């Protein structure tokens, strides 16, 4: 089977035989070959978030990146069908920005603890309690919550957009991640409860990292650069060299030459960094996101065989309001 042999060679050249994949390379290659064939047949594009496994990102992903990049790439893609290997709110965002396209998520379990932490009614109540300040909402939320917001942010642009908001407003409401909100408040010299109203949401992956371990790793690995995602608790962020979104973290790794890197975020990101920079030294400290990891090559193939059940829809009235808030992000992040 020359097709399969070539696919095995392609995946091996990408280094996939060295990293965690769902099985041995011939099995992975048979799946990626079939998925890529069916994807082409349907004229579909596959978005892969950096928390997916390397076999998905490198084996079948066409558009790869963090939430911001994927949202931007989706609106620019000419494809009529989007298969989103990421969590549900990301696929909803793609649908909101591309109402004429079909959008699918290859798992019924691809939720997100942050997205589930707040409802549209919660936002309405909060606005009634704090009338006036703009509602700045992290992209990790449902379409209904976005529809109640003034501007969406991602970890890649939250600080920049908040700075711009504070040029016109003394106070903002930031939803729903309490840790990211507190980290941003600290970076901007603002006081939670006074200048920035926060919600009590958190990410089940990032909230559990132990800040005490950073000192231990620094002693063990001299010259270590510690990078953490902005969803981590503030006590941990105090100990790191760099806080940001995954896109910024990857650029930091690319542009520096530390003796070793500790990437405090979801494991898929570290896997990708190791493949991109094989000569650099990465120290393992990561946690798996159960929602992201509910997507596998098998589930993508199953979707391509029977897509109807996993189509993502957003009521047009909700989508129209949510789109305004997302477009505000693109305007302010530019
Ligand atoms: S890593 Fe956290 S924020 Fe990201 S999808 Fe998983 S639960 Fe949600």
Image (spheres, helix red, strand yellow):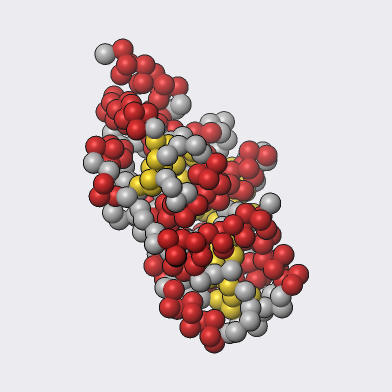
Image height check: is 85 above or below 216? above
Image height check: is 300 above or below 138? above
Which image quadrant: the N terminus?
top left
Q: Residue furthest right?
A: 167
Front residue of this view, candidates 14 and 78: 78
- Percent coordinates x, y for residue 284 in the rendering: 47, 46
- Percent coordinates x, y for residue 322 in the rendering: 50, 63
Number of labelled discs?
0
Can I make out residue 313 in this image?
yes
Q: What residue appears at the point 49 percent right and 77 percent down from the top-left corner?
A: 123
User: Is 75 on the left or on the right of 196, as rendered?
Assistant: left
Q: Residue furthest top?
A: 2
Q: What residue appears at the point 27 percent right and 43 percent down from the top-left corner?
A: 307
Image height check: is 88 above or below 137? above
Q: What residue appears at the point 48 percent right and 83 percent down from the top-left corner?
A: 125
- Percent coordinates x, y for residue 223 in the rendering: 65, 46
Front residue of this view, candidates 113 and 150: 150
Question: Which of the 4 image quarters holds residue 187?
Answer: bottom right
- Percent coordinates x, y for residue 145 in the rendering: 46, 69
Can I make out residue 192 in this image?
no
User: Is 53 on the left or on the right of 332, as rendered?
Assistant: left
User: Is 73 on the left or on the right of 292, as rendered?
Assistant: right
Q: What residue appears at the point 32 percent right and 50 percent down from the top-left corner?
A: 311
């Amino acid at each position: 089977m020359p097709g399969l042999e070539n696919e095995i060679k392609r995946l091996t050249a990408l280094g996939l035989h060295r990293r965690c994949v769902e099985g041995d390379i011939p099995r992975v290659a048979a799946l990626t070959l079939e998925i890529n064939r069916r994807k082409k047949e349907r004229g579909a594009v596959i978005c892969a978030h950096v928390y997916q496994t390397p076999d998905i990102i490198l084996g079948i992903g066409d558009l790869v990146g963090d939430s911001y990049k994927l949202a931007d790439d989706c609106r620019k893609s000419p494809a009529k069908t989007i298969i989103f290997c990421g969590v549900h709110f990301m696929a909803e965002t793609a649908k909101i920005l591309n109402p004429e396209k079909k959008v699918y998520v290859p798992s019924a379990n691809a939720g997100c603890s942050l997205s589930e932490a707040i409802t549209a009614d919660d936002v309405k109540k909060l606005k009634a309690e704090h009338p006036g300040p703009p509602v700045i909402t992290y992209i990790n939320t449902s379409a209904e919550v976005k529809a109640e917001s003034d501007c969406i942010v991602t970890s890649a642009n939250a600080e920049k957009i908040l700075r711009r908001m504070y040029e016109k407003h003394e106070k903002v409401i930031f939803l729903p991640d309490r840790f990211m909100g507190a980290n941003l408040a600290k970076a901007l010299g603002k006081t939670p409860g006074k200048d920035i109203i926060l919600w009590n949401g958190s990410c089940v992956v990032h909230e559990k990292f132990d800040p005490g371990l950073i000192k231990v790793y620094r002693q063990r690995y001299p010259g270590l650069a510690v990078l953490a995602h902005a969803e981590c608790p503030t006590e941990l962020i105090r100990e790191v060299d760099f806080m940001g979104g995954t896109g910024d973290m990857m650029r930091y790794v690319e542009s520096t030459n530390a003796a070793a890197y500790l990437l405090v975020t979801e494991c898929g990101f570290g896997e990708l960094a190791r493949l991109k920079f094989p000569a650099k030294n990465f120290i393992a400290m990561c946690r798996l996101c159960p929602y992201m990891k509910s997507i596998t090559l098998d589930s993508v193939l199953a979707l391509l065989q029977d897509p109807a059940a996993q189509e993502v829809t957003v009521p047009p009235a909700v989508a129209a309001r949510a789109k305004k808030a997302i477009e505000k992000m693109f305007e302010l992040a530019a």
